Amino acid sequence: MPPKHYRAPGKKKEGNAAKYITRTKATKYLQVSLNTFRKLCILKGIFPRVPKKKFEGNHKTYYSLKDITFLAHEPLLEKLRHKRAHEKKVKKAKARKNKELAERLLNRMPTYKLDRLILERYPTFVDALRDLDDCLTMVHLFASLPAVEGERIQVKRIHNCRRLSHEWQAFISRTHSLRKTFISVKGIYYQAEVQGQKITWLTPHALQQVLTDDVDFNIMLTFLEFYETLLGFVNFKLYNSINVKYPPILDPRLEALAAELYALFRYVATGSTRKPAENQSISSTEEKKDSDEKMDTCVNESDLQLAQLQHQLPSNEPGALMQLLEDSNNDDDDVDQDTIECKTLFKNLKFFLSREVPREALLFIIPAFGGVVSWEGEGTPFEETDEDIAYQIVDRPTQGHKFLSRHYVQPQWVFDCVNARIILPADAYMVGMVPPPHLSPFVDDEAEGYMPEYAETIKQLQATAKKNVMPLPDLDNQDLADPQNLIADGVMDRTQANEAAEERRKLQLLEKQYHDELKMEMSGITYSATLSNKKSENSGSEEMQHKDEVVVPVSTEKNDEDDRAKLYMSRKKRGLYEAIEISNQRKKDKVALLKERKRKASASKSG
Amino acid sequence: MGKEKYEESSSDEEVNSSSDVVEASSDEEVESSSDEVEVSSDDVESSEDESSSDNEKVEESDSSEDEVAPRNTVGDIPLVEWHKDEEHIGYDIKGRKIKKQPRKDKLASFIEGADDPKNWRKIYDEYNDEEIELTKDEIKIIQRVISGRTPHAEVNPYEDYVDWFEYEDKGHPLSNAPEPKRRFIPSKWEQKRVANLVRKIRAGLIKVSDQHKEEEHNVYSLWTDDTDSVENKKHGGYVPAPKPKLPGHEEAYNPPVEYIPTAEEINSYELMYEEDRPKFIPRRYLNYRSVPAYDKGVKESFDRCLDQYLCPRTRKKRINIDPESLKPKLPSRKDLRPYPTTCYLEYRGHMGPVNCISVDPSGQWLASGSTDGTARVWEIETGRCLKIWEVGEVARQICWNPSPDRPILAVVLEYDVLLLYSGMGDIDIQTKMKELLHISEPGATEDAGDSKSAATWIQHEKHDGIRMKHFKAVSSIEWHFKGDYFTTVVPSGDSKAILLHQLSKKHSETPFRKLGIPVTAVFHPSKKKFFVATKKFVHVYDLSKVEKIQKLETGVREISSISIHPGGENIIVGSKEGKMCWFDLELSTRPYKTLKVHSKDITRVTFHRTYPLFASASDDCTAYVFHSTVYSDLNQNPLIVPLEILRGHKPEHGRGVLDCKYHPRQPWLFTAGADSIIKLYCH
């Protein structure tokens, strides 16, 4: 008998060996270095697989053979080879001190485009949006890195990242599709909903980032290369969808003041047409009209009019202009309830940002929820002395001069309002105060089994906002008779309802006892006489206790039942069952730990 | 400039050749040249003067050696030898003899030397025959020479090198070749190359760098509307990377108090393994401005990148199910009644662990054997101990004869098997039994001759029964259902490990050879079949043909006991690792079901003779009661339902329940424990 793995010559491989290939073999097959292979994999989105049987050993990386043949036919592979050859030429020229040639060769470095790869990886736009999380996080991270010549990252790319991220933010803000925000220690998380896709990204705090040495920037830059291209195309598509010409041309004055985002807002808001600007200038008015008719959507028309208006109006009144645009656009956007809710959250409210407040985040968030915002500096829409400002965002220990007409709140207030979708009372967020805890909007407290105190307060506030008449349950007489209704109102969660029901039952018992006693008094039975009765009652209660004791064996019986069932399970199922039980227990322990800490904290506070 | 210099040097040569020409050729050229040239011409004049001057003039020259020019002209000859006896020491320059100086006597010269303080500076010059007084400068020079320095202090031996000649753009100074023609006409090859480049640029093959830069922002509508209809189908199943985990409350810059671990908890993290340690420790900042930059931001982003291209991806079915739904739907226990549930009676009396029990076929008596060296018979319903035999050794197993008219007990001791009359039944039976249990001596010898080493039948005087002596330790005994035959197992007996005995003939034989180490053996309840359990297998033999029919693979490590279903087609096997296997002989030679029941050794498994019940007893102090319906329909698998866990025995030296037996007619279970108690569980 031949050995187990013997394969007759000429017979094809079968099974896992035919479907998978190790990384070393793949690089040999493609005739590329490991670095090139890595780059190809990153750009093409090819990842290792787990074969059912690791035929070459456990410590190897396996790729699908189809993926590798797919790579072998990739034109990019050839391009990369060209590039490598070209780099060699440059190196040679430099070694021969032929500066001119080296320079010329460097200028003519072969390039490649990734648009085809993007279409290949994301055949539909929704696919691209679905995978945008990492892309946005990375681009925002690089946008916040120091743009210093001589660092490991080219300044040009950092500027590109900054531009792309601002464009994205401008779009999100314009379409009011931001849903959740969260200040974490790592940075600020945002969640937006674009075409039904929830996109979450993280932006670092606006501080100097730490570049560590344990990071291989080559890998990150390869990823960034793809992400930059992807985000460029996505932005194009998105801007097109709201009829705004894509590579936006910004007001150089604002750009110089590092207020690109605001400049973008203005650009998007004025809705510059998709036609190239040169054409517009050249074409006569008639042609313009023709083209208008061609487009003939009311949106464009209004946009154009607005654009013309914009030229006439003094440039430092964009707030009103934006408002105008909002109104004109309200009809044609078939938006869902959520968007409307978001759009109207800060409607008719003016915000002013103090110097020390991180401007970019708030400049992004507040307009996304319908507010108008200004800041300290040049080129701002309105001054600090504006009487209509309702909220001034301040992050300093004390505020010297105060306008009585406005609230001075900490930045967290904006984030909490956005997450709660109501305007929270500003008292707790005043200057110099320790703000209430900031809660993550990404946590489902019900599922987690533990609800922080402040989440409950917010819930109640939401409920009151929903029904302006509904009183706070804490303040009013507790209507425990129907906790079900409260659940329906969303005021209480299930556990609370259960507790309430329990309490109600106890109360009823007490009431009944009280009534009985009253009756007995009425009928004239003396207390001493009742004593004996009580004894019997006590015995009755003892019986009850006995019953309780009986319950205990019942529980052991239940254990027995468990054991019985476990006996009969297959080993696989039993393992699964035990694993589920362990994880449930872990969850319970976590909640218990939280409750314990909470109890201790409140005890120490009161004591 | 170079050419000028060149001419200068040539003029110098001319000057050297004849001085007259120098005087004559002092035209503009020489005049206009640099000072150097003049200096050199001066030198020439001076050298001329020297050559013409006399000795005095020579002494005037700046060289220190020339100053004291030797008067003597004899040259380098051994003066002392040749002029020793002469009046002169040599000749001066004009050929006159130089007279020797008068010799001073030593004393005079010494006195002179002692008086003169400058004497140490004087040296005698033998060649000129005179005394020279060295000057201070000369002394200094000598001192410097001795100390290895340059003689003259003003000379700097390490002076910076000044290259007076300017090389740059001078070309080779020697070549005076005219410029070649090729320097003036355009290159043919260059022209060809330029033409080629121009052609390529026009064809667009080469891009001028300005064009290159324009193409940076070329984004266009990549996704057209009709791509939405394109089915997103990737080969090999594209698995999108899992999204990063969303932050919880604890990651907030200002989380609720309860999310912040106490200092003790943070310290306790230090003791944990690095893998178990929480990656993120929540912290509270009182305001937004005090939040520092996150130092691990870039690193985490990098890690995410690594995960995306290095981590193998698979689709994993994450089942979110209620654990209760995993439990099998067992039939309700109520429907399967009756079965033993509660302890009803305890039989106390044994002084040591009760090894074995057996129930009389009538269901009235219970026999038990213990390590205290006694075998007892109890009345089941009252719990009264009826009879005690002092067997003197540990009773390993006890077994009632299944025939109702033969109330005989078989008790296994170390090497012996005792066949005892239990004392039940009327007088007829008593006499019959006495006859049966009587051995005539010749028969015994005949047996001994026949199979000498296997077993010998001896009359037991003390208890009035038969004592069968085996050659090695006996482990188990089992009666045939008719009550005449029985088998004993001698595990270390090699080819004589299984013995079949016939009670009526007092005859033993060893029909099976070539077995492994048997553990136990049982008869089929109705057919002529015989089951032998070895360590891992169960062999099924046909008794009439004495050949193996089946070999059952249990898959357990060590079989401890075996029991046959009354129908005869199903077997349960208990193992020492707590597993129980159910075999359906008609189905397969592999277990139909393996149940991991106990945490310790299973000591006994047993079927009920009439009810669909079986039980297992184990050293973990529990006994399990199972329901088992065996269907006559061949297509339907037997139904096995765990019913009850019976607890109550206490562990003794790591042992728990040692034996369990069902009542032959009632759904009652007897268990014998290592705590020397026998318990009866009733329904």
Image (spheres, coloured by chain):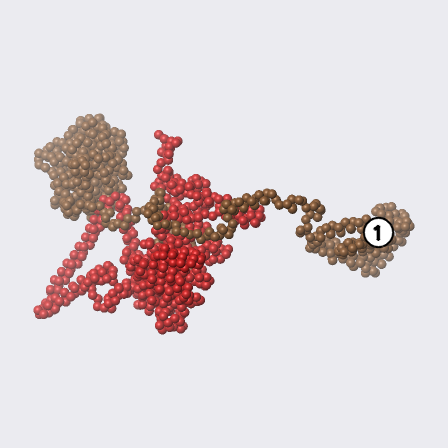
Considering depth in this image, is B185 or A542 the residue closer to the camera? Answer: B185
Q: Is residue B54 visible?
A: yes
Task: State the brown chain.
Answer: B
Instruction: Write the residue at 78% across / 55% down.
Output: B28
Q: Which residue is mark 1?
A: B20
Element under label 1?
Answer: helix
Task: State the red chain.
Answer: A
Instruction: Write the residue at 58% across / 44% down.
Output: B191
Q: In the displayed structure, does residue A64 sit left or right of residue B98? A: left
Instruction: Write the residue at 44% across / 47% down.
Output: A39
Considering depth in this image, is B344 or B339 the residue closer to the camera? Answer: B339
Measured as percent of width and height from the top left, residue A86 is found at 51, 45
Measured as percent of width and height from the top left, residue B42 is found at 80, 55
Considering depth in this image, is B408 or B540 the residue closer to the camera? Answer: B540
Q: Amino acid at mark 1?
A: Asp
Measured as percent of width and height from the top left, residue A462 is found at 28, 64
* Quarter of the image that includes the N terminus of chain A: top left
